[in-house]
Image (spheres, helix red, strand yellow):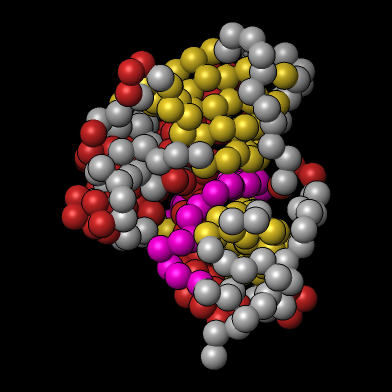
């Protein structure tokens, strides 16, 4: 029977787990899907001594377990409808880079998730899901995600009236009132959307099929939010860390509007350096020359001294 109120304390006691693997081919496909150059051998050639996945690859394993939690929402959210659930905010912290040990074909991972907060937003609720991914064999934590789902038309009774503040996981930064320190552009394509689906395992037809997108109210298929996030983080790391992914620590942002890859939209990442943080937003030239904000209030934390690479 569907619930009529939110029993937050009971929901916070539930955990979900899933086992996944990643391979050389998946890492290469992921890097290319975020716009990596085919000549960047550390990202596309497994024989390179520094071969690795871009740091936001950890979000892919968040996608895998969010499928389980999405289905479980029918059991713990009143009036839940699958199409009312959208990815609203994201936090990702990289403990180390994703690599393939020499001689191995794949690496097995265990990902565990739990709901840590549900917040009343009057017309919706925010569901905060804490996700931890570790190597199955060693038990070493590879990355942490916090996936924030924006769920429309859910009666908020039983949810928190105010969001619990948990440091970098919940902190959103306003856009600075000055010109960006650096700006980078990227043009999407239908091929990018298709490649990201294959690399991430997120086979939702919303990201490829025009009829599905139209039925959902979009003019064209939308790019997966974690792909847009990955593009933005790649821009920041390239701009302020010379492409050195080891310097990336974490990212937090709000996913404001989707990109339409099949429309070949040009997205611009605007970046402001403030100490070890790079604040950023991603915008697209919309109708009548008005910029549409795709990702807002973003912050990438770098493992560098203040101003080291600005």
Q: Is residue 53 left or right of residue 241?
A: left
Question: x, y percentage for residue 14?
Answer: 67, 78
> Which residue is drawn at the image coordinates 66% and 14% (left, top)?
177
**Residue 60 seen in the current view:** yes
**The magenta segment:** 80-104
- Judge whether 38 appears above or below 72 on screen: above
**Residue 107 seen in the current view:** no
Question: x, y percentage for residue 115?
Answer: 67, 67
Q: Work out whether residue 142 or residue 78 is closer to the camera in this orientation and state it.
A: 78
Q: Work out whether residue 282 or residue 217 is closer to the camera in this orientation and state it.
A: 217
Q: Is residue 152 left or right of residue 46?
A: right
Q: Work out whether residue 91 or residue 47 is closer to the camera in this orientation and state it.
A: 91
Question: x, y percentage for residue 109?
Answer: 53, 65
> Which residue is drawn at the image coordinates 76% and 62% (left, top)?
160
Q: Residue furthest bottom?
A: 1
> Which residue is drawn at the image coordinates 39% and 25% (left, top)?
284
Question: x, y percentage for residue 176?
Answer: 67, 18
Whether 82 is among the magenta residues is: yes
The N terminus: image quadrant: bottom right
């Amino acid at each position: 029977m569907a619930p009529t109120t939110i029993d937050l304390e009971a929901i916070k006691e539930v955990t979900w787990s899933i086992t996944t693997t990643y391979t050389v081919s998946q890492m290469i496909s992921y890097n290319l899907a975020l716009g990596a150059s085919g000549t960047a051998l550390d990202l596309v050639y497994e024989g390179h001594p520094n071969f690795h996945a871009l740091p936001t690859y950890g979000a892919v394993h968040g996608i895998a377990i969010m499928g389980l939690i999405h289905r479980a929402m029918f059991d713990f959210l009143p009036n839940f409808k699958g199409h009312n659930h959208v990815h609203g905010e994201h936090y990702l912290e990289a403990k180390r880079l994703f690599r393939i040990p020499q001689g191995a074909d794949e690496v097995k991972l265990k990902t565990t998730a739990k709901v840590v907060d549900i917040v009343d937003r009057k017309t919706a609720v925010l569901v905060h899901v804490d996700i931890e991914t570790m190597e199955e064999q060693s038990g070493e934590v590879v990355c942490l995600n916090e996936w924030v789902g924006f769920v429309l038309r859910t009666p908020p009774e039983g949810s928190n009236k105010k969001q619990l503040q948990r440091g970098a996981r919940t902190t959103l930064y306003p856009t600075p009132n000055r010109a960006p320190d650096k700006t980078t552009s990227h043009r999407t394509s239908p091929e990018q959307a298709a490649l990201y689906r294959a690399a991430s395992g997120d086979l939702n037809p919303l990201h490829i099929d025009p009829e599905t997108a139209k039925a959902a109210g979009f003019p064209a298929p939308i790019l997966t939010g974690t792909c847009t996030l990955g593009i933005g983080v790649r821009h920041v790391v390239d701009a302020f860390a010379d492409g050195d992914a080891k310097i990336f620590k974490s990212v937090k942002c709000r996913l404001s509007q989707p990109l339409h890859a099949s429309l070949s939209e040009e997205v611009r990442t605007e970046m402001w350096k403030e100490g070890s943080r790079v604040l950023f937003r991603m915008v697209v030239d919309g109708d009548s020359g008005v910029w549409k904000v795709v990702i807002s209030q973003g912050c990438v934390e770098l493992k560098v001294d203040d101003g080291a690479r600005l």
